[in-house]
Image: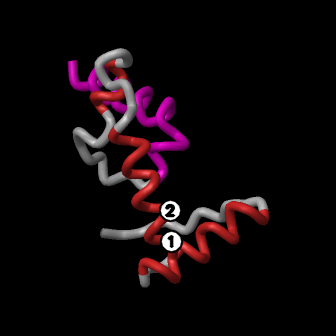
């Protein structure tokens, strides 16, 4: 699976703890962060926010959809109206 680079800023305490944890576990800090994000995502209240259920359901093959979703929806609607 492709991984995206996301710069983050940690305070000194967070950095110190993550480095020690990574060393003790024999894994990278990035791995710890990814696992932490996965745990947080698993705890999302999907039942309280139905919009979260659609995340990851399909693939548009568009790399810019997360940023330009409004444009993509308008383009699809325009295509649909032209076909009618």
Mark linked to residue 7: none
Q: Position of residue 33 (x, y in %)?
A: 50, 62
Q: Position of residue 32 (x, y in %)?
A: 47, 66
Measuring 48% from the left and 80% from the top, which residue is drawn there?
24
The residue range painted magenta reads 64-84
* Residues at circles 1 and 2 in contact by the CB criterion of under 8 Å: yes
Disc 1 is placed on an element classified as helix
Residue 47 lies in the magenta-colored region: no
Q: Is residue 19 left or right of residue 32?
A: right
5 or 29, which is in the foreground? 29
In the rendered image, the vertical position of residue 45 relative to residue 66, given as above or below: above
For disc 1, the marked residue is 30
Measuring 69% from the left and 68% from the top, which residue is drawn there?
15
Q: How many marks?
A: 2
Q: Position of residue 9 (x, y in %)?
A: 73, 60
The image quadrant that residue 82 belongs to is top left
Q: Quadrant of the N terminus?
A: bottom left
Colour mapping used in the image: secondary structure
In the rendered image, the vertical position of residue 35 relative to residue 50, given as above or below: below
Q: Dot 1 surroundings within 10 Å: few (below 14), some, or many (20 or more)?
A: few
Disc 2 is placed on an element classified as helix
In the rendered image, the vertical position of residue 83 relative to residue 68, given as above or below: above
Measuring 33% from the left and 36% from the top, which residue is drawn there?
55
Mark linked to residue 33: 2
Q: Dot 2 surroundings within 10 Å: few (below 14), some, or many (20 or more)?
A: few
Q: CA distance from mark 1 to mark 2?
A: 5 Å
8 or 22, which is in the foreground? 22
Give the main secondary structure of the magenta stretch. Answer: helix
């Amino acid at each position: 699976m492709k991984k995206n680079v996301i710069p983050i800023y940690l305070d000194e305490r967070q950095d110190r703890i993550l480095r020690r944890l990574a060393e003790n576990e024999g894994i990278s800090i990035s791995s710890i962060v990814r696992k932490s994000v996965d745990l947080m995502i698993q705890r999302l209240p999907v039942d309280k926010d139905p919009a979260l259920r659609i995340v990851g359901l399909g693939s548009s093959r568009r790399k810019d959809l997360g940023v330009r979703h409004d444009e993509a929806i308008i383009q699809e609607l325009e295509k649909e109206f032209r076909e009618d």
